[in-house]
Amino acid sequence: MQAPEIPRPLEARRSGPLEGIAELPGDKSISHRALILGALAVGETRVAGLLEADDVLDTAAALQHLGATLSRGDDGEWRICGVGVGGLAEPADMLDFGNSGTGARLVMGAIATTPITAIFTGDASLRKRPMGRVLDPLSRFGATFAARRGGFMPLSLCGAGRPISIEHHVEVASAQVKSALLLAALNAPGCSRISQSALTRDHTEHMLRAFGATIAVEPLPRGGEAVMVTGEAELRPACVIVPRDPSSAAFPLAAALLVPGSEISLPGVLLNARRNGLLETLREMGAEIETTNVRQSGGEKVGDLVVRSSPLAGVEVPPSRAPAMIDEYPILAVVAAFAEGRTVMRGLSELRVKESDRLAGIVRGLKAIGADVEELADGLIVDGRGIDGVRGGARVSTHMDHRLAMAFLIAGLATREPVSVDDSTMVRTSFPKFRPLMRSLGAEMMSPRR
Ligand code: S3P
């Protein structure tokens, strides 16, 4: 078992106007999928702009254990020599996914219909996250598993020797669960039909098409959609260009809105309609965010953003928008604390099973820095105190959660007194250059004196 890491506190202070260009890292969701589908294709897949952060690198290491060959060129391009659908080899050691629920759950799907056994584990945060939501439906393909009571890691998954195709409705609004089932369907004879009432991110569907899978999508009469995948697929390799991550963009973007006099640009950000809930909400709050140069890149919509500091008003966020901004609620809650008036966010029970219980973490953090917030069973009410109204002057606990750490550091750029976080090490799971990037824009972020 690994020794726990030494926590690294970090502090943010009220900063002068932010300006410059924020070159953001590659999208995390697309990066995981590019590696996994590359490993399942026959031949060499190339990936440009891959997110080189712990979460994705843990998936890369797992795929090597499963027999794929991955390498990185000096130009930053990754090459994956795939083993074909059904060709993954039994790993000789445990697969350790660190902090990454996406990596773990998607790879569970990829092996569930191949007759190999793998043991999955992760860090203390991942070992508390529910895996039954993906293991139970995967067992319908014929896979078997043994997990800790409650469906927690470490767990072993034994892929089906004679998989069967399934029809399954995914109740939970999770793209990870849907994607795991779509990946499992690739090696099950016949056509599997996976439906979901929520419209969760559709990168797996886009990328399956690019890799040559036979896939169809149809709307459900009462909302949502069904995805049909034909099994025993032969995937051909692809060239993937990973757009920049909107969930990482959210942090410098929010900082520019909150720090008076700021103007920053964020080129090449993914604008997939299933990921743009934060931009929509911020614009409703009065944010000045310009989108230009909208284009298609690698099968996804991308564009350049320019953001200027703006007076913001509280809004009611429709619960139906949650899947399109699920990772952005921590930073939205911070922004709402500096707006004028009340922001209501509901339909967020999924936030309780992220890298931490994010609803509880946001509430504790906001209260610590002097903001007005109320925790609901499935949401938050934030009463904004205006741009100069939040005190700060606290150390916030981040519970091994990268997004809580970044959200509260952004808060500290606008509070009257500095804000520190107890540990910033987890930021490297999704945004390793967060601190140098924020500093290059003019943000004051440093190791605290105490
Ligand atoms: C992801 C889906 C979301 C999101 C996560 C990435 C994905 O999780 O929170 O950061 O890449 O499919 P859920 O599917 O559990 O909502």
Image (tube, rainbow, N blue to C red):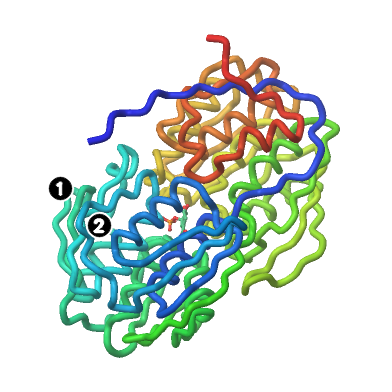
Residue type at mark 2 is: Gly
| Residue named by callout 2 | 132
Q: Quadrant of ligand 1?
A: bottom left
User: Which quadrant: the N terminus?
Assistant: top left
Which image quadrant for residue 417?
A: top right
Residue type at mark 1 is: Arg
Which image quadrant for residue 230?
A: bottom left
Q: Residue at x 27, y 54 (%)?
A: 131
User: In this view of the protein, which residue sits in the foreground, 315 or 246?
Assistant: 246
User: In this view of the protein, which residue sits in the foreground, 233 or 75?
Assistant: 75
Task: Indicate the secondary structure of the residue bearing disc 1.
Answer: loop
Q: Residues within 10 Å of mark 2 (few under 14, many from 20)?
A: some
| Residue named by callout 1 | 149
Is residue 277 found left or right of 399 in the rendered image? right
Q: Residue at x 51, y 81 (%)?
A: 209
Q: Tell which residue pokes out farthest to the top in this image.
A: 450
